[in-house]
Amino acid sequence: MAWIAENRQRSVPTDGTPALTESLKAHLRETYFPRYPTRRAVLLPALHAVQHEYGWIPPQALDELAAFLEVSSGEVLDTASFYEEYWLKPKGQFLFQVCRSFACEMMSMCEPGRSCGTRELSNHLQKKLGIEVGQTSDDGRYTLVELECLGACGTAPVMLVNDVLYENVGTETIDQILANLPADPHDFHDPTVTWQEKAH
Amino acid sequence: MPIEPVLTKRIPLDPAQRKTYWYDDYIATGGYASLRKAIDTPPDELIKIVTDSGLRGRGGAGFSTGQKWSFIPKEKKGAHYLAVNADESEPGTFKDRYLLDYDPHQLLEGIAIACIATQVDVAYIFIRGEYHRQAKVLERAIHEAYEKGVFGQNGVYGSKYKVECHLHRGAGAYICGEETGLLEALEGKRGWPRNKPPFPAIAGAFARPTVINNVETLCCVPHILERGPAWFKTMGTPSSPGPKLFGMSGHVNKPGVYEDSLGITLDYAINTLAGGMKGGKFKACICGGISMGVLGTNQLDVKLDFDDVRFKGGCLGLGTAGMIVMNEHTDMVLALRNCVRFYSHESCGQCTPCREGSAWMRKILDRIVDGRGRAKDLEMLLELEKTMGIMPGTTICGLADGTAWSTRTFINKFYDEFAARCPDEPTKSVSLKVTRGRMNVVTPMGSNTR
Ligand SMILES: Cc1cc2nc3c(=O)[nH]c(=O)nc-3n(C[C@H](O)[C@H](O)[C@H](O)COP(=O)(O)O)c2cc1C
Ligand code: SF4
Ligand code: FES
């Protein structure tokens, strides 16, 4: 729930090395500063960039972003804590996000006993990964989340594994995905993105 | 009634044959011809053409697009912005994903034309964070468009109009689909919808005049320019002209996105487009994203346009035309609980009736689902529902109206099923009229006239 303020107070561990590296700063300065009339508007892309780098957004990065974008750290935390996609605590290497909204949940009832919807998927994943919804496995490899509509209701039930969307998922699909996950999450790509990514 | 595909002319029905049309493919199939035409047409004339076509917004509210553009000040005193709403998070809606995946330049052409018409300097495409592939498609398409001279400081194809276009990724919040919530997110703040007025056309993004349009709306624009408003009106109904993407999902044999004219019947959409019911007989259908409410078992003859769904169907409106079809095995209490859970989760928390109301409604529904429903529960749900939304005038944005209308239509149309789960029949009769409210206020979700 976006509006519930959690107690996010924690010490900012720092060994002196900045979380916001020079190359990250250069990237933000060159790509995003010219796009917006204010510095604060760079905040969302900047948080995405930090999360892309570390897999989550360390508290230290929030403070450094505030200084870099010339806004207060309160404002940075205000924005960062509102959006569910930003992880302010570490998550697993592979993030399983199962859609639990209308079309996906109702799929269970299409042909009772035979069809697969959110509940079946989520239960199967919990059993396979040995974690409950919202938890991360002890080895830091998996995190399981249920979230709202992913905008693919026509192929319900669906789930996201990191950046990759799986449609018409069944329990066998999950077994297959798990068996084929690479050791390094950086080797995990959407097979339908066949072009080289570049930005103007 | 089937029409020749317009928006989906580059997207075949068979998924195996679909591919993304990049710049060269797009040009080869007649793309960007309308943009060249737009360069030579005075902006006022462009707005008039779009107004004459009767195009209504495809993002949910159904507001006249030409009229929206005409609100932008003609005399330019600073930057103007365009915010493209690609946040698509309404459960049941997946049409924009489809347009972005396969035909990104159709959108970019629509954007460039809209920018010329309303003297916009910078267009931001606000795409939801979970659309990873679509964001990558757009990044590449925008890059191509810059290289080929559509965007950039050299002017659109060398003309005097200079347009910039950037992608802005959201981060997982439904409320950023609401137009002013979107603007806040664009400015780097939490996505809290703004009080109106001032309207975005006067003070929107960065306090400058801003147009906000849905992806599908903008995709219609190049076609209107190419073939004229009269042609556009040959499709659909007089009050809702044009083609529309219908997202069919749920218990049907062939779910997917289908293009047809506005005003087809629900029966046609289910049985002809989506291949008929799966797993059992028809029971109910969400009529345009869950916010619009539900059509009942005897409403298969409702026409799917902006008015009939509302006045005959008793729903809030056509919304995004994302239909979730349910068969006889569907548990309506569970279905409503899912809707209300969604709203209580996605409420941004600014307005008390929305934040607290939806949370309590969710608790009540949890109780009913658990088999602990009480006689008073249904009455309580209907009372709570009446207190929230733009229509009774208690909230800032229309999210709360979604909570209200889904609750109202589900309980009203399937009353017996709910009552059976709440053992003693409520003693008082239940009135569904909105009793208090501001008079005749036109809101983004429609006018408050009842
Ligand atoms: C709670 C809420 C969520 C909305 N979500 C979306 C959305 O995801 N996509 C969209 O295009 N419009 C959405 N809208 C409608 C927008 O506020 C706005 O009316 C629309 O983007 C205007 O574009 P149009 O005139 O082209 O339809 C939403 C509205 C509300 C109240
Ligand atoms: S109605 Fe709900 S979502 Fe909309 S502004 Fe108010 S609290 Fe936020
Ligand atoms: S409800 Fe699951 S993708 Fe829309």
Image: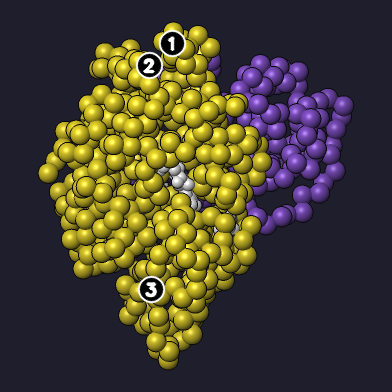
Q: Quadrant of the C terminus of chain B?
A: bottom left
Q: Colour of chain B?
A: yellow
Residue reaching furthest front? B75
Q: Is residue B107 left or right of residue B181?
A: left
Q: Going 32% across and 72% down the picture, which residue do you hit?
A: B413
Residue B58, image x, y percentages: 36, 43
Chain purple in the figure, letter? A
Q: Going 61% across and 41% down the picture, which residue do you hit?
A: B184
Asked where in the image residue B225 lies, by quadrant, the reply is: top left
Per the model, the C-alpha gap separating discs 2 and 3 is 52 Å
Mark 2 vs mark 3: which is more N-terminal? 2
> Given the image, what chain letter belongs to the residue carrying mark 3?
B
For discs 2 and 3, the disc positioned in front in the rendered view: 2
Residue B449, image x, y percentages: 40, 64
Which residue type does callout 2 highlight?
Ile
Q: Secondary structure at mark 2?
A: helix
Per the model, the C-alpha gap separating discs 1 and 2 is 7 Å
Pick whichever, B344 or B33, lies toward us: B33
- Residue B407 seen by the camera: yes
Mark 1 vs mark 2: which is more N-terminal? 2
Per the model, the C-alpha gap separating discs 3 and 1 is 57 Å
Residue behind mark 3: B411
Task: State if disc 2 and disc 1 touch (CB < 8 Å).
Answer: yes
Residue A65, image x, y percentages: 76, 31
> Given the image, what chain letter belongs to the residue carrying mark 1?
B
Q: How many marks?
A: 3
